[in-house]
Amino acid sequence: MKVVKFGGSSLADGEHFAQAIKIITADPQRRVVVTSAPGKRKAGDIKVTDLLITYAKQVLAHESTTATTKQIIGRYQAIADYFNVPATKLTPLIDRLTDLPSWDYPNNNYLLAAFKAHGEWLNANLMAIVLQQLGYEARFVTPEEAGIRVTGTPNNATVAPETYALLDRFSFNDSELLIFPGFYGITMAGHIATFSRGGSDITGAILARGLHAQLYENFTDVDAIYVANPAVVKDPQPIAKMTYREMRELSYAGFSVFHDEALIPAIQGNVPINVKNTQHPEKPGTLIVPDKGFQPADIVTGVVSGKHFAAIYLHKYLLNKEAGFTLRILTILARHNVSYEHMPSGIDDITIILDKNQIDDELVDVICNEIQEEINPDQLEWIDNYAITMVVGEGMRNRTGVINDILEPLTKNNIPVPIINQGASRISIMIGTYNQDADRAVQAIYHRFFAN
């Protein structure tokens, strides 16, 4: 059995719906389908999820929602019309959408989560209706029914362990197509909570593990995962096969084709993932597999740069003699719910690299002030323009001279490297550059390993 997930761009309108259905019905092993909310139909269009966020904000502000709900309904109505779905079939979906403001929510965060989740809820329900109309045995299944339980915050949920025991007891027959909405689960108290943005990938992985799938196919709008970002490197080489571990390392710095959190259930269930293009399903795509027994084709599998980093730099003489020094810094970060990414250090220096998405200017000042008071460093500096370039490959594990091969093209291109760190897994090397040099660094490293 295979679990198949379609992204928002793959379900944006009736024509894309038809292509997805063609893929679903072409392979009898594809029994479980996970849908995202409709994405953009063209440049300048608005994703349904963003419309639902607007809808929620209008409700909270006691503003008119008429125009927004009309726009949302119009997106689903257009898909229904493409397949000549009777109006009576769509009425319950429209009623549910317009009833959302009258539901009881513990707080505004839960309201926002419930509104966002309905992009997927409506699309999965509509997909089941269309498949039934086309003569297929299809069933719409909600996370409530299947037992997808979550913990955490309403808009950044985490799957609860008991989910897999509940999915083990979930029954279905071999002839039916099960259509699940992605992106959300149900809290212990029975409320809707969403995963982080793009979380339909996570739902697909949860179902692949929980229902013991042989393969998880993730259909999106690219032919494969590439060695480098096509926006940075022209016509980069596609990756035929990679390990979970490689994908996790590359996702950290910005590989955005597949949600990095979605790898965890797949890893736990030992389920291979195939990332493919909805418009070209005949192409092999990229297969993500366990590392056991994996034979790498190249030294380097991928190179990617993320420009969303910053750093706190401290200099203090005899730093290495002070017990608990880093603990005191980490305690300050923990107090403000800020995690660190890397912490390279020297005898008198330490650099704490942070994700700028977690911190704003006001919090930077607060944290730096507290560090100054607690640590009293000789020098304290906030560096706002760090980029991290990850060079990743299972082929690097037992290879000597890889660091030299990476640094040589950077030197030739006059790209300064303030930080370099080899990962504990020995399959990744982190290069710290400044934002303005990040793309050139990726290009230089790519051409060193792949141009010829």
Image (cartoon, rainbow, N blue to C red):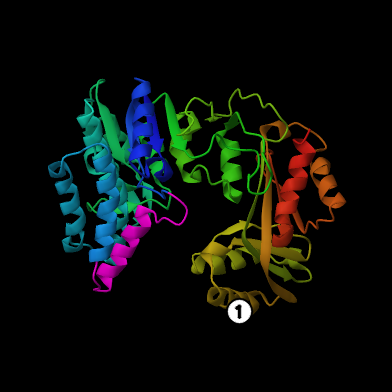
Q: Which residues are magenta?
A: 42-65
Q: Considering the image in quadrants, where does the C terminus appear?
A: top right
Is residue 140 in view from this perspective?
A: no
**Percent coordinates x, y for residue 65 in the rendering:** 24, 66
Left or right of residue 47, residue 411 in this image:
right
Q: Residue furthest left?
A: 88
62 in the magenta segment: yes
12 in the magenta segment: no
Is residue 250 in view from this perspective?
A: yes
In the image shown, does 321 or 116 lie closer to the viewer? Answer: 116
The residue at 24%/37% (across/down) is: 141
Residue 67 to residue 301: above or below: below
**Percent coordinates x, y for residue 41 in the rendering:** 41, 48
**Percent coordinates x, y for residue 305 in the rendering:** 66, 51
Q: Amino acid at mark 1?
A: Asn
The residue at 42%/44% (across/down) is: 9
The residue at 76%/37% (across/down) is: 449
Which of the 4 image quarters holds residue 31? top left
**Dot 1 corresponds to which residue?**
369
Q: Considering the image in quadrants, where does the N terminus appear?
A: top left
**Percent coordinates x, y for residue 145 in the rendering:** 21, 39
Left or right of residue 94, residue 409 in this image:
right
In the image shown, does 352 or 136 lie closer to the viewer? Answer: 136
Secondary element under disc 1, as helix, strand or loop, is: helix
